[in-house]
Amino acid sequence: MKEFELKYGCNPNQKPASISMADGSDLPITILNGRPGYINFLDAFNSWQLVCELKAATGLPAAASFKHVSPAGAAIGLPLTPEMKRACFVDDIEGLDDSPLACAYARARGSDRMCSFGDWIALSDVCDKTTAAIIRREVSDGVIAPGYTDEAMELLLQKKRGEYNIVVMDPNYVPAPEETKQVFGVTFRQGRNSIPIGRELLGNIVSREKELPDSAVRDLLVALITLKYTQSNSVCYAFDGQAVGVGAGQQSRIHCTRLAGDKADKWFLRQSERVLSLPFRPELGRAERDNAIDVFLSDDYEDVIGDAVWAESFTEQPQPFPRAERQAWLKEHVHGVSLGSDAFFPFGDNVIRAHRSGVAYVAQPGGSKRDSLVIETCDACGMVMAFTGLRLFHH
């Protein structure tokens, strides 16, 4: 297939729309089902690169959950704890522990279930039945993978009344070393950001603390590779082989750090017994539970107690989880988080905010006039900081 005609572009008024190769060659994809759109393909091709790089860097299957050309979550296929299974609503999935790919997607979707609603999924490996079982019951636009088992296809074809978007990516496809795009009729050309992200990027440790355990190296690589495909400015918190908070597209880096830190805090709090024991009505859907949990973990909780829709989510009214109690729980339970930034920290406030969310390890390019101040702040917090020398802007 040399060209695929799209229903429309970013918006319904933007017609005509299509995808094709600049040199007239065949597209490196096969559409098995559905009719993906313009934004679907932007998500698909960005997320495919992300999961391929995660697998290459870690040797484990990887998955990503994408929304509007940025990852809501990304992860590698490590086992889930019982608490994580419950928090990600996958504790009833048969065979989960036997499928690293399914674990990767459960983690990626669970990184930020609010933002993953209606996601595009990327899988580094052939989609198996267990992974498809998770995908089938979540609200999602489509999936890209190098292939699908017959059992997985049977499950996926049941989504969206048989119209779910299922795309196969040629795993041997290598894009040209240069890329172009047009803005306002002007053509931009640049070399692809193809530099590999590996352990060697973390060799320049500038903080007083120098110890960087293998688990932190793994998580920093997850954070940096995730940032490579996140709309800038961006910051990513990572823990246990997955992104746990992504702050994307903010004009100020401290706002990225705050946004991602708040998401990371909620990811950890979802695994607290206060949240896991919420008395949801049995018939309440997963998306509605996610919405209720988000409100429960916010400072707005007491303002909505009397709301009828909120009250109908539970068999009995939950007691509030006040900010002070949430912060105390996080301080007791959350340690050893890693943080990546796609560009340098201009002030130490980013480090202080990250420290509040349990960050102990940081990777950033360096190069700010205030690097010494940022390092001093890092040392005061007892954190390890590596300067990668590599900016990862993505637009």
Image (cartoon, rainbow, N blue to C red):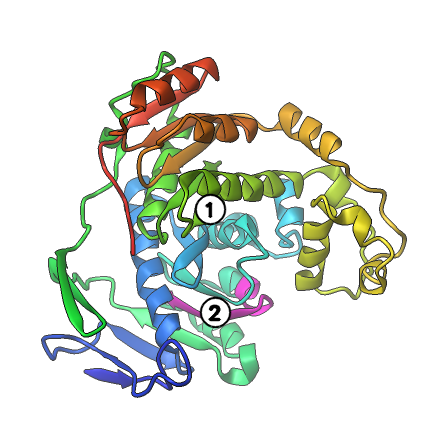
Q: Is residue 151 left or right of residue 193?
A: right
Whether residue 126 is situated above or below residue 27 in the rendered picture: above
Q: Tell me residue 5's x, y (percent).
A: 29, 86
Q: Is residue 286 left or right of residue 16?
A: right
In magenta segment, residue 134: yes
Q: Tell me residue 238's x, y (percent).
A: 46, 38
Displayed quadrant of residue 70: bottom left
Question: What segment is highlighted magenta in the picture?
Answer: 133-144
Displayed quadrant of residue 225: top left
Q: Tell me residue 306's x, y (percent).
A: 87, 56
Q: Secondary structure at mark 2?
A: helix
Q: Secondary structure at mark 1?
A: strand
- Which mark's residue is nearer the viewer, 1 or 2? 1
Can you identify the residue that label 1 sits on?
246
Whether residue 166 is situated above or below residue 281 in the rendered picture: below
Displayed quadrant of residue 369: top left
State the residue at coordinates (63%, 25%): 331
Q: Amino acid at mark 2?
A: Ala
Instruction: Identify the image quadrant of the N terminus.
Output: bottom left
Can you identify the residue that label 2 sits on?
152
Q: Tell me residue 203's x, y (percent).
A: 25, 24
Q: Is residue 366 left or right of residue 89?
A: left
The Cα atoms of the two marked residues, 1 and 2, are separated by: 29 Å
